[in-house]
Image (cartoon, helix red, strand yellow):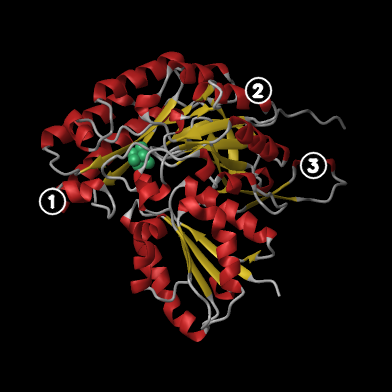
Amino acid sequence: MTRKLYLETFGCQMNVLDSQLVLGQLRAQGYESVTDRDQADIILYNTCSVREHAEQKVWSRLGELRPKKAENPNLIIGVIGCMAERDGINIFQKFPHIDILCGPGELDQLATLVHNAAITSAPNRTRQVALMGAAVRRSTTLDAAEDHLEMLDLSRSISPSDDISQAYVRITRGCNKFCTYCVVPYTRGPEVHRPPKNIIEEVQKLVSAGAREVTLLGQTINHYAFNHGDGRTTTFAELLYQIHEATPDLPRLRFVTSFPRDFTNEALMAMRDCPRICRYLHAPAQHGSDRILKLMNRGYTTAQYRDFLSRAREFMPDVSVASDFIVGFPTETEEDFTATMELVQECRFKNSFIFKYSPRPGTTAIDRFKDDIPEETKRRRNNQLLAAQQQASEQFNRELIGHKVEVLVEGESKLVSRRNTTRSNGIELGWEKPKPKITIQLVGRTRGDQIVVFEGHPKMKGQLINLQITSAQSLTLFGQLPTPKTTPILV
Ligand code: SF4
């Protein structure tokens, strides 16, 4: 009997990719993926511990499953990802109905864990646990022999039903930066760089299957440098050139997330020289005050950040840059906050993801600093910074009005969704039966990562099309398909 599997993903693009990879492995073992949790025999949550909100959602989902498990003791429930690694077996105290725990660094074992759980019925079933462990979590090096997770990426399978017009490929795993507010180095472990050959083959496989855009993923992606062990190193810039050259049929290649300090001129030149690499950088500045950056352990000053930005714009005047900021970090004064405001006003970011600081379990900051900025002050600063960024984004977007842009159509717009049935132009000929022409509000993404809403045909999903930009708001551009040239009909 085919077992049904429900997998819900929280958090970042890295988690989305992890879910796709483990789902591929489990499907290959005969599990069927379902979108209705109530139909499932196995329920997995791929979790995130960066934001409190995502974590609360997981706790609440697990609470909801308590009565279901009492009703059906054979239901298998698993928590995978960052919350599993951070909280470890302590999770069982609060939620004894969980059967599987698997950290992000051990996901290559998940299929075995699920199998082991599935072959034993309750009450004889034993809990299945795979976690990295404290020693690995605290280190900054991982022996190649220990990097068994490469097998997960190499196992990637593509099913005909998968929508892969936009696909992710990981080039690094883990992080060694240890920013004080962040739990990622402790949940994903030390930074590991994948062999270029494996990355290139994976991108080629996706392109052959129909990918139109591939986004390379890494926590600090531009820190990539693969040591071949024979004295040769492939740098991030070299990797970009190699992928670009090896995939001439891939229209768009992009990457996230960049670490400002690690950006070499060579990497910026690769972006400039390779026409199919999107000129978009997500390079979080996090703060405008050097004192706070130091407390955050970011490893750069605002002068270094400004230097990176001016070098990027020197090589690519049209580059689009997005940032992240944290407001209300412990001890942040009005003066510190003003410095962040000034950075946002000066840097012409396409957009910024702005967060109020909250102490996260497992981070250095929660032990080292008192969360001393009142919630009201955090909220005010958050709103002020949002307003400054909104103004900058609107100005940035307005510059595109009247211009033509290429978008990759992602699907139906959530902003407005209306169906419009019009008559085909062909009916003027008199003998042709009128055909309904369906148009809906679609959403596409520019090479610079701007969202464009326009009216088009549902079949345009996954296609690259050109649009004329007609108006702009801070978060969205509005466009239209170019009017087709009318050919006079001779009667
Ligand atoms: S660079 Fe800093 S914020 Fe980013 S994943 Fe690493 S520790 Fe976290």
- At x 42% / y 69%, what residue is drawn? 61
Q: Check disc 3 and report its element: helix, strand or loop.
A: helix
Q: Disc 2 versus disc 1: distance between alpha carbons?
A: 52 Å
Q: Residue furthest bottom?
A: 71
- At x 59% / y 42%, what residue is drawn? 167
Q: Which residue is mark 1?
A: 374
Q: Check disc 1 and report its element: helix, strand or loop.
A: loop
Query: Splitting the image into four quadrants, where does ligand 1 fall?
Result: top left
Tell me the quadrant of the picture where the C terminus can be found.
top right
The amino acid type, in three-letter code, at marker 2 is Glu
Q: Which residue is mark 2?
A: 245
Tag 3 or tag 1, which sits nearer the N-term? 1
Tell me the quadrant of the picture where the N terminus can be found.
bottom right
Q: Disc 1 versus disc 3: distance between alpha carbons?
A: 65 Å
Tag 3 or tag 2, which sits nearer the N-term? 2
Q: Please name which of the two marks, 2 or 3, marks the residue nearer to the observer.
A: 2
Cβ–Cβ below 8 Å for labels 1 and 3? no
